[in-house]
Amino acid sequence: MSLSLEIAVRVGGSAVVFAMLALWEWFVPRRQLTVGRRPRWPGNLGILAIDMVTVRLLVPTATVGVALIAAARGWGLLNLVGAPLWAAIVTGMIALDLVVYTQHYVFHHVPLLWRLHRMHHADLDIDVTTGVRFHPFEILMSLAIKISAVVALGIPALAVLMFEVLLNSSSMFNHSNVALPPRLERMARWIVVTPQMHQVHHSIAREETDSNFGFNLPWWDRLFGTYRAEPAAGEQRMAVGLPIFRDVTESRILRLLTQPFRDDGGR
Ligand SMILES: [Zn+2]
Ligand SMILES: [Zn+2]
């Protein structure tokens, strides 16, 4: 698949998912927003635009390109053992999800990395745009981590492409301000990270911020003991954000970009 087609598939697919979730949370919101959309959306969407430009300018060979090179040269575990394509795709996608979980855990526990990641957590509300609000430096680091995993494991390009599309969509889904019907929510939590599960991760309470690290599969949190079913204050009353950066002006794009470099009494 050509690079421009790959990018078109990713951008087009994401735009459709974004629009559907935005409509859903507009008509049937799960929680009442504290500061609302107007102060936050320009900054959050501005960050998305910067991330897209940064990644495309500085890293011309995206993860899919690296996967193609690894396959051609026989690099990586799955290429070395000669795994059948379907097995390599399934294993590769699950492995990438574990890599993303681990990366997320590490970004919470290493102070320097937390400074980059906390911008995602400083959002005073959570909705579909929170799911694309990551500092460009964090995006670049996570790209480097994913590229290393793709090369080391020899993950097929198709698996990488499907995972990127899935991760994009699931990040928008599990941040959106929507709720599944209770019965469906209980069942869905065994196969996918739901918005109500990820909400706990955006609690202002530190022990709750440090739980539910998963983005696609909820298994890693259950397996490694970081799963938390609901916030202590209850889903509706839980305060969102961090103890720092609580002024609404912190939602402006320049403030978002400089948050990692400013000390505001962070942990
Ligand atoms: Zn986090
Ligand atoms: Zn989040």
Image (cartoon, helix red, strand yellow):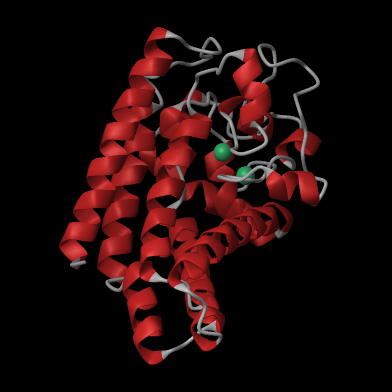
Horizontal and vertical percent position of residue 135: 46, 51
Q: In this view, does 138 lie above or below 81?
A: above
The quadrant holding residue 221 is top right
Q: Residue at x 69, y 51 (%)?
A: 108
Q: Please tell me which residue is depicted at 53% across the width and 23% down the height of the picture.
A: 125
The quadrant of the image that shows the N terminus is bottom left
For residue 262, say whether it is visible.
no
Give the quarter of the image for residue 40: top left
The picture places residue 267, in percent across and down from the top left corner, at 74, 46
Looking at the rendered structure, the number of numbered marks drawn on it comes to 0
Q: In this view, does 50 lie above or below 146?
A: above
Q: Where is residue 73 in the image (x, y as percent from the top left)?
A: 38, 91
The answer to whether residue 178 is above or below residue 8 is above
Q: In the displayed structure, does residue 47 sit left or right of residue 112?
A: left
Residue 226 place in picture, x, y as percent: 78, 44
Q: From the viewer's perspective, is 161 left or right of 91? A: left
Q: Residue furthest bottom?
A: 73
Q: Please tell me which residue lies in front, 130 or 241.
A: 130
Task: Tell me if residue 113 can be seen.
Answer: yes
Indicate the quadrant where residue 132 lies: top left
For image coordinates 53% across by 69% down, the residue present is: 145
Point out the quarter of the image occupied by ligand 2.
top right
Viewer-proximal residue among 66 and 52: 66
Q: Nearer the viewer, residue 45 or 10?
A: 10
